[in-house]
Image (spheres, rainbow, N blue to C red):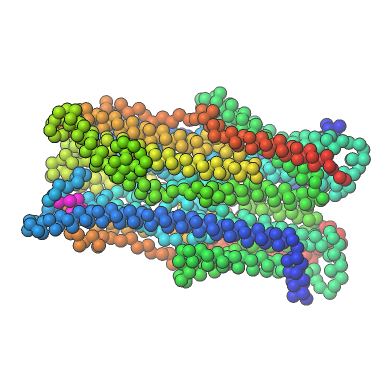
Amino acid sequence: MLKTIVAHEARLLLKSRATVFILALLVASMMFGIWNGLRAVERQNASARTAIVDEAAKKQRVLDELIAYEKFTAARGIPREFAPVNHAPPRPGEPPQGTNAGAVGGEKVREVAVLPATGLAAFSVGQMDLQRNYTLVDMKNKFNIADNLEIENPLNLMAGTFDLAFVIMFILPIFIIALTYDMLSGEKESGTLALAMTQPISLRTFMAGKLLSRAGILMLVIVAVGLCALLFSGAALGSLGDPGTWGRFGLWLLAVLLYAAFWFGLGVLVSALNKSSETNITILAGIWLVMVVIMPTLVSLTATTVYPAPSRMDLKVAMRDASSAAEKAESETTKAYYTDHVEMLPSKETETYLTVFLARQEALERAVEPVFDNFRKQQDRQAGLVSRFQYFSPAIVMQLALNEISGTSTERYNAYMDEVFAFHQEWRKYFTPRYLRKEILDSSTYKDFPKFHYTAESPNVVVQRTGLSLFGLFLIVAAIMAYSFARLRRYGVRENG
Amino acid sequence: MIGVIAKKEFLCLLRDGRFKWSILIMILLLFTAFLTGYQRNESLREVREAAQAKNTEQWLDQDRKNPHTAAHFGNYAYKPQGTLAFFDSGIGNYAGTTIWLEAHKTNFAQNRPAQDNGAISRFGDMTPAMTLQVLLPLVIILLSFSAFAGERDSGTLRQALSLGVSNRDLLWGKFLGIAAAVGIIVVPAAAVGGAILAFGLPNDGTVVDRRGLLLVLFYLLYAVSFLFLALGVSAIARTAKTALIVLVGFWAFATFIMPKAAADISRIVTPTPTYSQFYHMTERASARGLPGAKGPLAMPLDRQGKLERDALLKKYNGPTVRDLPIYWVAYSMQIMEDRDYQIYQKFLGDLRAVFFRQQSTQDHFGVVSPLLPLRSLSMALSGTGLVDQERFNQTAQDFRIAMIRKMNGELIDHTTMKDPLYIAGREVFSKVEPYKYVAPTLGESLAGETQNIVLLLAWGILSACFAVAAVNRLRA
């Protein structure tokens, strides 16, 4: 019997112009969404590529100069020398800056530490439009390095991207509401419900048939378009061969399915209340407004009011205080000369300059670290509060999950930044002792400079971060469905509730 | 007659449970938004003012040192809040708040507050402006969708018309009745806003007053547009259900879908350059010359340096720079600074043009969504829009070049190649005037907004015409 109803309903739905229109709108907005998401990822990748090419060219220039010097000395059989820090180009026969590990690692050569996009990055832009997906690492202090903003019109950042995640979180529920608000009330208002109930089926089977037909059609569309989106963006990003991409896609489907089920559940719940179609749509629109608009902004307001992020302005003030304090320790004579322009310094003093510079960077880091830590701690506290409050609104659950699944969450970014900071230490460890020993860098060592290798988060981490909240959502959906179907028992086919 | 209808409409709305709740919730949200907005704004202002004052102190109190080294230590410019930021935070969360102004480097404003607030902040901020822009229209729709259609459903429209009420009276009566109900929400909120304006904000009273009045005017126009639109649809729609679906659909389209879609479309039309592209172009121009420029700017840097050196040697009649009465190293650094300043001004100007072109593209979509012109006007009047951010960026860069000219100038004048030793202290550092942000005047704020004012007015007038036309053809 259920089968007959599902088939019958599906036929009816697909013959209704309103349904077809809704489905077409959904497909169109999903396609626009994935296109926008893909453009955002490609923009990030292009930005990183330009940086890599530019930095490689800078390194090559230093290397070329060094090789020329090496040839010059070899031809004449004279010993090579260590170049003191100097910003003016070397005269022929003079050692170039490329021999000096401090100058090379300090500013001449920078490593581009890239956070690669996941195979599903185009599905949700998340927080990736705020900062670059790469960091330029040299021997400056880590707070300088962490200032890695990407250029974007603040107006666009405020509006956010019309990406697939937006379509799922905001628009999909509207379409589900449009498909479900009159599942029973519509039949009742046109007088066909009583007629249908004369057949040997229960109201609950009838409802289940309506629900399954609608959910089936919608999910078919979402899976089909989602798959197309994956193939389209995956082909462009070259990530289809990676099994991780498919794992993420599976998780994405699961999350979207649960979220859709939540809204279908509300449709059933409202139907079970036995009110007019007009009332149903008011109630559902109200729930949408509360869940998708009001709740998230209120939770955000609460999180940032209870645990306000410390002001970045205060961080800068602390940095400068620390820098001044470190400076007080330096000798008067060094300061008399340029500390940043050392062309004029007698050569023994130029070495103090760089030593002082490096020492100052480290002193500054030590002094500011507690302030910087505060940011992470507050961020963690905010995130903790949000994750506790997320069950008030499945839209929040969804946003966190979709960002996580697409690899565009704050958590993944922070984990990446930690890797960058660790690499920064490694970079320093490589260059500082060589500089202090006044080792003359050889051109053959240039290929051995530390390289940043991003250690991707294991798939388990993503499952861990999303699993609990998705399970929570599942429980909510199950509860709504169970209650609604139980309540249908009390549904009066002829009278209003 | 109009008065009677208005009174009936008003009472009916108040007695309806659904509306009671929505009005109550709206009032609560508005109050929350006003109070948290105000509190947050004040604490931000304190932090900002303290940081800027501290910056001046740090600059003046730095150890005695070479002025150029002092320029490397540099200054920070911290972005001040707009005058009415408590009402509309605008792009505040998404625009950089701190710029490091140092020798040799032109930096962007860093540290967007959004990056510290987690992804959830991307749902939007609960500001009074957001509440009025997004939620108020929905309440208006809920209060008015059944004005005609609902009476038609229940058959009372036929009765009312049979009494000989003119269509026009019916429209204005309903308009006033619903407007009064909306007033219950808005008037207390406006009073809170007005009180903050009058007592809570520092200085500049008159300017803020005018801005506040204009805000009231524009928001009123926006609300009235939605009210007329809803009444018109209600008069045309066959059933109340249809009216509701059409209106809620339009609301979602105008307030959620369009702003995002418009931003994406504006980026497709005018792509934003990336950070690496920007520095790729500027560094290239700095070394090899600015394409399309005239004079020394078009030359490679080393050629310009050589030209300037030769000119200087000729002027002072010295065979080498070591014989000059001025300090050549500092002089050549200043040549580079001035050159880079012009080059960056060019590229930053181009970037600014991209931003404003994107804004203009988005504003064009005001034809299909009244939210877009209102949003722009609201930000402009609150001092939290693109104009204000760009004013901050530009004044900071101007401050930077002035500071560096002063510091390098000190060196050029007081030292020579033979005797480059020069230690300066507070007496020299204090020649740099502290950074001060001067907000755009009302005229400057509204300079680019003519189109938006026209669009918003058009929405008001056309929706009123639509309502009148729809009601004239009213069928029971």
How many numbered marks does the figure carry? 0
Q: Is residue B449 left or right of residue A487?
A: left
Quarter holding the N terminus of chain B is top right
Reply above or below: B221 against A239: above
In the image, A323 versus A442, the foreground residue is A442
Q: Position of residue B37 (x, y in %)?
A: 56, 38
Magenta region, main secondary structure: helix
Residue at x-position 36% and y-position 47%: B281
Q: Nearer the viewer, residue B422 or A466?
A: B422
**As drawn, is A234 to the left or to the right of A325?**
right
Residue pictured at 44% horizontal, 35% vertical: B392
Query: Which quadrant holds residue B330?
Result: top left
| Residue A258 in picture, x, y percent from top left | 61, 64
Magenta stretch? Answer: A95-102
Q: Is residue A348 visible?
A: yes
Please determine whether, in this image, residue B439 is positioned above or below residue A364.
above
Q: Is the C terminus of chain B in the top left, top right, bottom left or bottom right quadrant?
A: top right
Describe residue A483's horizontal placement relative to residue A375 as left or right. Answer: right
Residue B295: x %, y % from top left: 31, 36
